[in-house]
Amino acid sequence: MIIGVTGGIASGKSTVARAFAALGIPWVDADDVAREVVKPGEPALAEIAARHGRRVLLADGRLDRRALREIVFADEAERRWLESVTHPRIRERLLAHLARLQARGAPYVLLVSPLLFESGQHRLVDRRLVIDVPEALQIVRTAARDDVDEAQARAIVAAQMPRAERLALADDVIDNGGDEQALGAQVAELDRRYRNLAGSPSVP
């Protein structure tokens, strides 16, 4: 069984994944895979550089993610083009990573993806878990984490799927607006539920 874990930026998806990992559940992060497909030597990076030139490359030839982010968040057409280049390659590698994790024999595995619905990756999973936080908290966390001003943080949040729409597509929801203890309790309860669905006993 594959559980898709998603949520808006700075909602705490990786924190939730690590909490599941502490219970013995493996996971693959679509963000990590997205970085893999734009490494030097990868076809996707060559296509991006051909379209945007040196302005999206660092001195050592790696992708300047901040420069590219500024371009795609300012231009919807550029964002769609970038997704057409990267999403098929990301999907292919995600499938390979998930197959390796499933071969280990865990009762279920996690696919952590900020674009689970937008990219069509929800079709790869059996259940969809949304990590939810208030939008105001997202903006504060994004500005602090990514070292951007409030206006850019708001633009990043606004460019994503609306919170209400994401929640409407969820099979399960974790509220990550509270403390670590509250989060841990929700993860433990979902772990029991998922193990039951997968026909595996819960951890003690």
Image: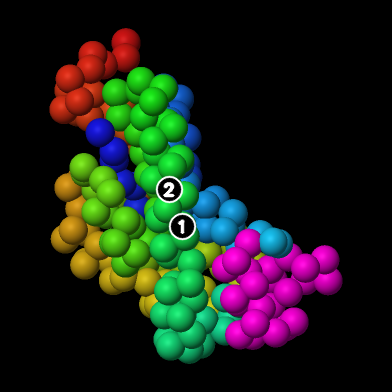
The residue at the point 73 percent across, 65 percent down is 62
Label 1 crowd (10 A; few <14 / some 14-19 / many >=20): many
Q: Could you tell me how far apart the alpha carbons at marks 1 and 2 are, in whole angstroms?
A: 6 Å
Image point (44%, 72%), residue name: 83
Q: Residue at x 68, y 68 (%)?
A: 63
Residue 118: horizontal and vertical position, in percent?
32, 67
Along the line of sight, the residue nearer the viewer: 104 or 42: 42
| Residue 175, horizontal then vertical, whole percent | 30, 47
Q: Number of numbered discs present?
A: 2
Question: Can residue 130 be seen?
Answer: yes
Q: Is residue 35 magenta?
A: no
Label 2 near label 1: C-beta < 8 Å? yes
Please tell me the numbered disc located at residue 90. 1
Mark 2 lies on residue:
94
Quarter of the view holding residue 191: top left
| In-front residue for pair 84/126 | 84
Q: Position of residue 195 (x, y in %)?
A: 23, 23
Question: Hey, which quadrant is residue 137 in on the image?
Answer: bottom left
Q: Is residue 10 at least partly visible in the picture?
A: no
Q: Secondary structure at mark 2?
A: helix
- Position of 160 with respect to 15 (left or right) is left
Q: Work out whether 127 lies above or below 190.
A: below
Q: Amino acid at mark 2?
A: Leu
Q: Amino acid at mark 1?
A: Ile
Q: Which residues are magenta?
A: 42-67
Residue lying at the far top of the rendered structure: 204
